[in-house]
């Protein structure tokens, strides 16, 4: 029997995309799809097989260059080893029902599950920060903190409002009379996408008008470069929409929450250019269904998934996701997994 079972959920972002890396607001929720790392500490190497993916990861504790690890999913494991610095190795298996390359944070779920299995002491924010750095080191993609932090700090039954500047998190109860449905559109990876270009566009906007988190629509109008202005306009509007969505969910006003999701999609499509024609078509199709409050692309974009907010049972396509609690680790067979930290 395995000595350790570490389990980390995927996540879907309800609203607030491409706002985390400028210290903005996001509203993701951890979902009932998990990556599990099961095995036993020991030895001086990390040796992991995968129930889904080909190849075996076999790495020393002194990782030199995470990006060169093989097979390709081993890069994330290597990045985590480098950050967690375990004193002993680990031998076991990875299994996951988080769809890979879907924009549902399969890589962040792998990072957090591996970190816990290797003995990361937490607390959740530090666990998330180590895993975010691991992702940077593994892929070179300059991702924000949203994915790792919601996976490390989620609360059952809630979405998580994250202030990506202070890194404070506030659970937002999810209305029981609403359902979240995810529809997978096309596989994608942020590695090799224009994600890093968007991060750079936002940095350039901040060089002109200061932190986007504090900028007003009037500040944005001062930006002369039309592309940089459009990126900034998205971020400033999206931060406002996140806070309005939280207020709408707390008031049980699902129609307003849905309308804000549709506005968010239009902004990501027209101003931030991270949507695709297939995602636009899916959002339009879903929004035309009775009982659907709204839909939008979710996550980094350039493919991946769209998310819809709807009445229970309204959609025949996609899959329903439920808000679950944070990643956890337990000795195998224990009833109650422990939270990190
Ligand atoms: C990816 C990144 C996140 C965030 C989203 C877009 O999921 O990992 O940090 O930037 O894209 O909101």
Image (tube, rainbow, N blue to C red):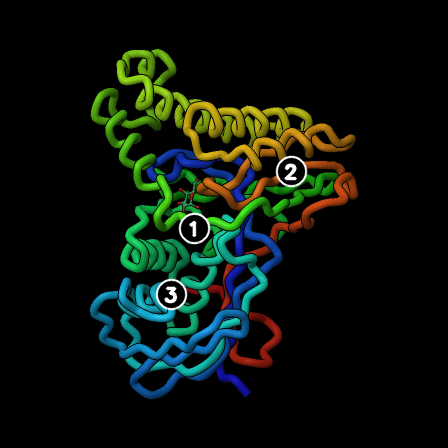
Residue depicted at x 63% and y 35%: 282
Give the percent coordinates (x, y) of residue 252: 68, 31
Question: Along the line of sight, which residue is nearer the eye, 302 or 268?
Answer: 302
Residue depicted at x 47% and y 60%: 109
Which image quadrant for residue 231?
A: top left
Tags 2 and 1 touching, CB below 8 Å: no
| Left/right of residue 159 with respect to residue 90 in the rendered view | right
* Mark 2: few/some/many CA within 10 Å (<14, 14-19, 20+): many
Give the percent coordinates (x, y) of residue 241: 51, 26
Residue depicted at x 48% and y 53%: 105
Residue picked out by circle 1: 189
Give the percent coordinates (x, y) of residue 190: 40, 48
Q: Is residue 110 something that shows in the picture?
A: yes
Question: Along the line of sight, which residue is nearer the eye, 209 or 263?
Answer: 263
Residue picked out by circle 2: 308
The Cα atoms of the two marked residues, 3 and 2, are separated by 31 Å
| First along the sequence among labels 2 and 1 | 1
**Marker count (numbered):** 3
Residue depicted at x 37% and y 59%: 127
Circle on res. 48 = none
Residue picked out by circle 3: 72
For ligand 1, the image quadrant comes to top left
Label 3 CB-ligand 1 distance < 8 A: no
> Mark 2 or mark 1, which is nearer to you?
1
The Cα atoms of the two marked residues, 2 and 1, are separated by 22 Å
| First along the sequence among labels 3 and 2 | 3
The Cα atoms of the two marked residues, 1 and 3, are separated by 12 Å
């Amino acid at each position: 029997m395995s000595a350790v079972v570490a389990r980390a959920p995927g996540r879907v972002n309800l609203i607030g995309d491409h706002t985390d890396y400028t210290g903005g607001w996001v509203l993701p929720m951890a979902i009932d799809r998990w990556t599990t790392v099961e095995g036993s500490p020991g030895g001086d190497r990390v040796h992991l097989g995968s129930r889904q993916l080909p190849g075996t990861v076999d790495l020393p504790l002194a990782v030199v260059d995470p990006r060169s690890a093989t097979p390709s999913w081993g890069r994330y494991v290597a990045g985590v080893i480098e950050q967690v610095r375990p004193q002993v190795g680990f031998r076991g298996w990875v299994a996951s029902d988080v769809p890979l390359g879907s924009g549902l944070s399969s890589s962040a779920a792998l990072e957090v599950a591996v970190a816990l299995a290797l003995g990361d002491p937490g607390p959740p924010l530090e666990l998330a920060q180590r895993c975010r750095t691991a992702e940077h080191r593994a892929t070179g993609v300059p991702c924000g903190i949203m994915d790792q932090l919601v996976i490390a700090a989620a609360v059952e039954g809630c979405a998580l409002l994250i202030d990506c500047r202070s890194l404070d998190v506030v659970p937002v109860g999810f209305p029981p009379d609403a359902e979240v449905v995810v529809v997978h559109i096309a596989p994608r990876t942020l590695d090799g996408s224009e994600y890093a270009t968007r991060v750079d566009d936002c940095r350039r906007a901040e060089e002109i008008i200061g932190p986007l988190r504090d900028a007003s629509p009037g500040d944005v109008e001062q930006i002369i470069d039309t592309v940089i202005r459009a990126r900034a306009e998205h971020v400033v509007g999206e931060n406002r929409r996140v806070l309005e969505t939280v207020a709408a969910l707390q008031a049980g006003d699902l129609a307003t929450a849905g309308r804000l999701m549709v506005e968010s999609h239009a902004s990501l499509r027209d101003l931030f250019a991270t949507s695709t024609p297939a995602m636009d078509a899916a959002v339009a199709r879903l929004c035309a269904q009775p009982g659907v409050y709204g839909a939008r692309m979710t996550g980094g974009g350039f493919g991946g998934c769209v998310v819809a907010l709807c009445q229970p049972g309204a959609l025949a396509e996609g899959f329903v996701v439920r808000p679950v609690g944070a990643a956890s680790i337990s000795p195998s067979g224990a009833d109650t997994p422990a939270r990190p930290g």
